[in-house]
Image (cartoon, helix red, strand yellow):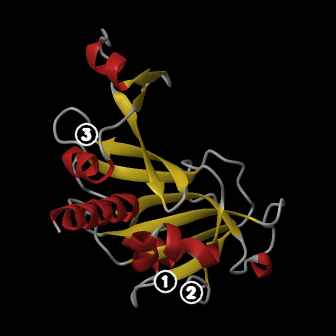
Amino acid sequence: MKIKVALLLLALCLVFSQTAFADLGDKKAAIAAKYGEYRMVVDDRGRVWTKADWEAGDKGKESTLTYIHYFTAKDVRVQLDVMYYDYQADPRVKAQRFTPDWSIQIKDMKSYFPDIYALITAPEAKVFNTNSKMTSNFLDERSPVVLGAVVPKEPTGRKGWYTLVLFNIKGEGTLIKDPKQITPDTYISEIVLVGIDKLEVDDSSLRWQKNIFQ
């Protein structure tokens, strides 16, 4: 009986560790609790350090731009890049980028990223597409059309801001050039969470559309 209970608890721990995501404005400790310790960092000169080298090395005046974590979502390994405000005094999450080892389809968002799915399908969430760049955090080749969602959820310590979720989308081996090409079968290669000023939500470049994730 004790073995069965232990296995059940282990399974539950694995499920939650694979699906949780940290909110914008969270502290580094919250990130570590959800994803484990970071594996690498990128400093302000673009150099990549292992955790051990970063903590033991003579960095001088270098500051960290990005902490890199890895976790598993369902059957896909995901790289999570976390960028912070105020690295030295009180680091809080400024932006997050989720990059799965292979692209997932819009129709599978709930299976792979259930917490993000819950965020973008909440009644108050508004989905849009745009040809504006919106973020410099995408690393993969970006389609001319970006898919996104605005969620009236104020990041901790960022009054007057909402949470913005952006998707780097692709067709079957092609870039998305027309919003009409976006379907449940469209692929997502990267997901970025950043803050957006409430005043920017009325930007005329955002084309509001039906919530395709629902």
> Residue at 67% across / 47% down in the picture?
140
Report which residue position mark 3 lands on: 86
User: Looking at the picture, which amino acid does disc 3 mark?
Assistant: Asp
> Residue at 30% across / 8% down in the picture?
58
Q: Is residue 66 above or below residue 143?
A: above
Q: Is the Cβ of the residue at disc 3 closer than 8 Å to that at disc 2? A: no
Q: Is the Cβ of the residue at disc 1 closer than 8 Å to that at disc 2? A: yes
User: Looking at the picture, which amino acid does disc 1 mark?
Assistant: Lys
Q: Looking at the rendering, which quadrant does residue 214 occupy? A: bottom right
Report which residue position mark 1 lands on: 126
Q: Which mark is residue 211?
A: 2
Q: Is residue 197 above or below residue 62?
A: below
Would you say residue 205 is visible in this rendering? no
Question: Residues under labels 1 and 2: Cα distance?
Answer: 7 Å
Q: Where is residue 24 shown, x and y percent of the image?
A: 31, 59
Q: Is residue 79 above or below residue 117?
A: above
* Element assignment for label 2: loop
User: Looking at the picture, which amino acid does disc 2 mark?
Assistant: Asn
Foreground residue, 26 or 76?
Answer: 76
